Image: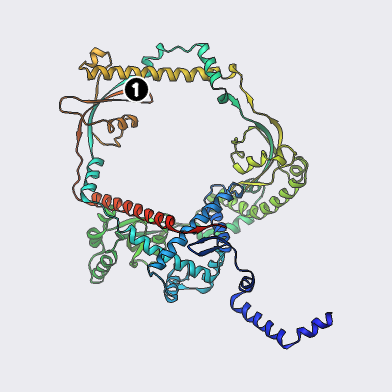
Amino acid sequence: MLQDMRENSQGTIAKIIIGLLIVSLSIWGMDAIVGGFSGEPEVATVNGEDITEREFLRVVQMESQRRLSSMEQPDPAMLDEDQIRADVLDSLIQEQVLTQDASAQGLALSDADIDALITQMPQFQVDGQFNRDRFVASVRNLGMGVGEFREAMRKQYVVNQIRSGIMQSGLVADANASQLMRIQNQTRNFRVVQVPASAVADEVEVTDAEVEAFYQDNKDAFRQPEQVDAAYITLSLGALAEKIEIDQEELQAYYEQRSGDLAREERRASHILIEDGADAGQTMATIQERLEAGESFEELAKEFSIDTVSAKDGGDLGFAGRGVYDEAFEEALFALDQGQVSGPVKTGFGVHLIRLDDVRRSEVPAIEELEQQLRGELARERAQEKYAEVRAELADSAYAADDLAGPAEELGLEIREARGVTKDGGQAPFDHAGLVRQLFSEDVLESGYNTELIDVGDSVSVVARVREYREAQQLALEDVQDNIRANLEVRKIREILEERAEAIVAGLEAGESLDALGAGEWEQFEDQERNAAGVDAQIMQTVFSLARPNEEKASYGTAITRSGVAVIALDAVNEGDAEGGVDLDQLRSFMASLEGQREYAAYQQFLRDTAEVSRP
């Protein structure tokens, strides 16, 4: 049989088939050949078009990585995989609906358009020029092929065209913007009289029967959750670094190596800042033309710069080192020669022209002044490699050991103890959700294993085990009665205060005076804004929620404060200014943007509701 196979493989037909396979592999890859026979599985179909499983899994992976990177302490175990998959599928369906809509409207990008967009993207450039190697590497890091990336760009761009068109079409009536501005700028005149909690505290009495009744009615609130006492080992880069000794010769060599960085350079800059809007390019071109014509940078800063503080001084920003300015601003500033003016530089504040006015460099401090800092830096640098090595050893040793004594002795680490750790956590390092979840897992809690080695911080790792487990239990009344009594006292004081305040309001509305009501004296406030400083926030919230008073009678209300209760008399509402200006323009733009967002959301929902979607 083997001989027959060998002879057939040398035949003409076999050679043709192999040749076709080679050509297919070179052009489309293995997926094209396998897919040609089996078809690519789909996870959903939208109006007859498939969302493939490969695309779905790729986006799931990207979304998982995005959520991990947004965590303060990244922990894969914290990810809800089912929720991620559901969210990703919904987003892909929505994207497919929008893409189909764009296609139906005749919106499309040619291959040349895609090429132009890609070559202009700064993340694919080196020294301002498109770099194919960087482009390919970046796309592969996303888990995509070049063709997939180009298609994703094509879809996203045409969808963005529709989104931008709808969102920019949002309109708001000038009258509505002016009315909202008047309300926002409104001020109010009011009076306040305070009734402190101390004034009614003597009227409050909580009996033992009330305490016991509250305990019986709320027993679930007085249960001690299940707890564990845990032993643990901590491995940290800082602790390793403390054990590393740096001799004087090493310190001197490191000092000389760092001397260039230790001499701090500061640059004195001036700038002209304009808003980054539709007219920014023309405005900046005008400024540059006038500079070239010999006009003073200082005078142009006073005329054009929206940074009014520096504009008064001709745009002068003073001396500053690295790490002070926006990254783009800093990069441009430190690339200038003294007296040179940059081209337009865009930051989050707007568009700048930057002039370098002066450069000064400080002397390198003596080694004695920096000895402690440099020893620490060098020790941490040396500890980095050792940390990775010891971490791997601890992970293996703890996994195989029946306790923590062996790994601790082997690596010279200390065993510590934490008491009363619940499923909600405890003191560090058991404030890390991943470590706590492992501690209460079946393997650790019931089978007596060590936890895995968990990274709980930057170069800090912990392995733990349970020493003692305590089931959840009902706390005895005598253990919690003091807290119950204190809470009931606070509750009763508040009830009495509210009754007292309502009685005062009723008397005032009936025409009685504060003296007759025995309620103290009014404190007067005039022209107070919504965010007025020096007035309790709860009082201000009540003041601006009260109905307008009429000419003869104030509007009354009450507010619970930190110290008691306040009775409020609203005397007048002063209309706010709604004249045209920057604030009104910004408010109008903001309201129009919100309206555009609502319209686009409604448009998306309409497309989604009318689409035919099937999920296998």
Q: Identify which residue, 373 or 413, lies in the foreground.
A: 413
How many marks on residues? 1
- Residue sitting at 60 percent across and 66 percent down? 40
Q: Identify which residue, 363 or 320, lies in the foreground.
A: 320
Q: How is the image coloured?
A: rainbow
Q: Identify which residue, 167 or 292, lies in the foreground.
A: 167
In which quarter of the view is residue 558 placed?
A: top left
- Residue picked out by circle 1: 565
Where does the image place residue 437, in percent across and percent down from the top left? Answer: 64, 41
Quadrant location, the C terminus = bottom right
Can you say whether 409 is above or below 328 in the image?
above
Asked whether the viewer can see residue 398, the reply is yes
Q: Residue furthest left?
A: 551
How busy is the neighbourhood of tag 1: few (under 14 within 10 Å), some, or many (20 plus)?
Answer: many
- Residue sitting at 27 percent across and 69 percent down? 285
- Residue sitting at 58 percent across and 63 percent down? 54
- Residue sitting at 62 percent across and 44 percent down? 434
In which quarter of the view is residue 42 placed?
A: bottom right
Asked whether the viewer can see residue 247, the reply is no
Where does the image place residue 122, in percent across and percent down from the top left? Answer: 44, 67
Can you say whether 542 is above or below 362 in the image?
above
Question: The residue tagged with tag 1: helix, strand or loop?
Answer: strand
Quadrant location, the N terminus = bottom right
Q: Is residue 585 left or right of residue 154?
A: left
Where does the image place residue 128, in percent across and percent down from the top left? Answer: 44, 71
Q: Residue furthest bottom?
A: 12
Where does the image place residue 420, in percent across and percent down from the top left? Answer: 64, 31
Circle 1: residue type: Val
Q: Identify which residue, 450 or 543, lies in the foreground.
A: 543
